[in-house]
Image (tube, helix red, strand yellow):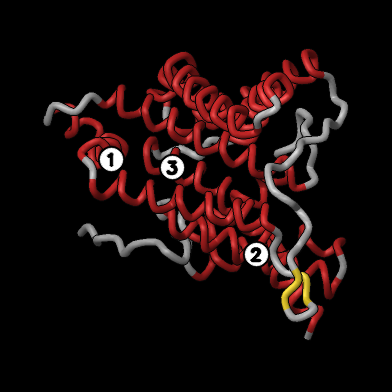
Amino acid sequence: MERFWFLTFDGLAAGAVYAAFALALVLIWRAARVVNFAQGAMAVATAYVGYAVVSATGSYWLGLAAAILSGLALGAIVERVLMRFAGPGGPLNQVIVALGLVLVIQAVLGMVFGNDYRPAPAPFDTDALTIGGVAALSPYDLWVLGAALTVVALLALLFTRTPVGLRMRAAAFAPEVSRLLGVSVGRMLTLGWALAAGVGALAGMLVVPTGLGLHSHAMDLVFVVAFTAAVVGGLDSPVGAVVGGLLVGLILSYVTGYLGPDTTPLAVLVLLLSVLLVRPGGLFSAARARHV
């Protein structure tokens, strides 16, 4: 039983990290109806900016702010310079451009910073707290989970309670009708990409200190697992992203602990296929109207 509780707490800690990254994927999907496969590489780039500021100032919080601001700027630039011109050809063009952007960012980071693993300090203690003789969550895990839940709450307010959020959703779902109603679709798309990259930058700063280290390919595996979490929860649901991230974290923890780490990729694939076969829109997908 002690092993079960240890794996449960460990899964929740890892799931909080996946949930934070899945939120960025959900945000760009809701704003632009596209899966940004360059999200991981963009997060790594902003993490380098953040930890450069940390090294220069000694303050993690200044580095976190710098990473988020650079993420906002990078997202806006990517949409304005690349995605806006790839969009008219259909979503497949944007996917291809995003995959190409991954290669460019990783190559540039490798040339500028090298491919060595750099340690990334955490702002809180990473040693797990002990409850009843069982290792539970660490202070840093609690910070990651709290940050993810805070972002979910803010995104929910943005998309449901503010005029800007409603315009962003309208621009994503019905751009032509939105233009007729006076909505600046281009600005809403730029804002969506900027916010998604900002959330991705936050996720990157949360993920890197968990043992990955900082290098150009730090987010490759995290992106795959986070994408699975976003699909499991539902690409339209920020709450689903968090629940999906925690669920994926728990499943991977149990599989690794009881069956061994070699079965982890298979567990991710089985979970993804199961959700796609039973509920393709995700566990938190809304019912869709039927068109006759």
| Mark 2 crowdedness (10 Å alpha carbons): few <14, some 14-19, many ≥20 | many
Nearer to us: label 3 or label 2: 2
Which residue sits at x=44%, y=28%? Answer: 194
- Name the side, left or right, on which 127 lies relative to 286: right
Residue at the spot 69% in from the left edge and 60% down from the top edge: 269
Residue for point 41% across, 55% down: 237
Q: Residue furthest bottom?
A: 1
Q: Is residue 163 left or right of residue 206?
A: left
Spatial CA distance of label 3 from label 1 is: 11 Å
Which of the 4 quarters of the picture holds residue 288? Answer: bottom left
Q: Label 2: state its secondary structure.
A: helix
The residue indicated by pointer 3 is: 27
Q: Which residue was labeled with disc 2?
A: 12
Q: Residue at x 54, y 67 (%)?
A: 277
Q: Position of residue 132 (x, y in %)?
A: 74, 81
Viewer-side residue, 201 vs 145 = 145
C-alpha distance separating marks 3 and 2? 22 Å
286 over 171 or under it: above or below? below
**x, y percent for residue 10:** 73, 65
**Residue type (three-letter) at the residue carrying disc 1:** Gly
The residue labelled by disc 1 is 165
Quarter of the image for the C terminus: give it: bottom left
Classed neighbour count for the residue bearing mark 3: other residues with Cα under 10 Å, few (<14), some (14–19), many (≥20)? many
Mark 1 lies on a secondary structure that is helix
Give amino acid for label 2: Leu
Reading the chain from its start, which is encountered first: label 3 or label 1? 3
Residue furthest out toward the front: 58
Q: Position of residue 170 (x, y in %)?
A: 24, 39
Q: Is residue 102 visible?
A: no
Q: Which label's residue is closer to the chain start, 1 or 2?
A: 2
Q: Nearer the viewer, mark 1 or mark 2?
A: 2
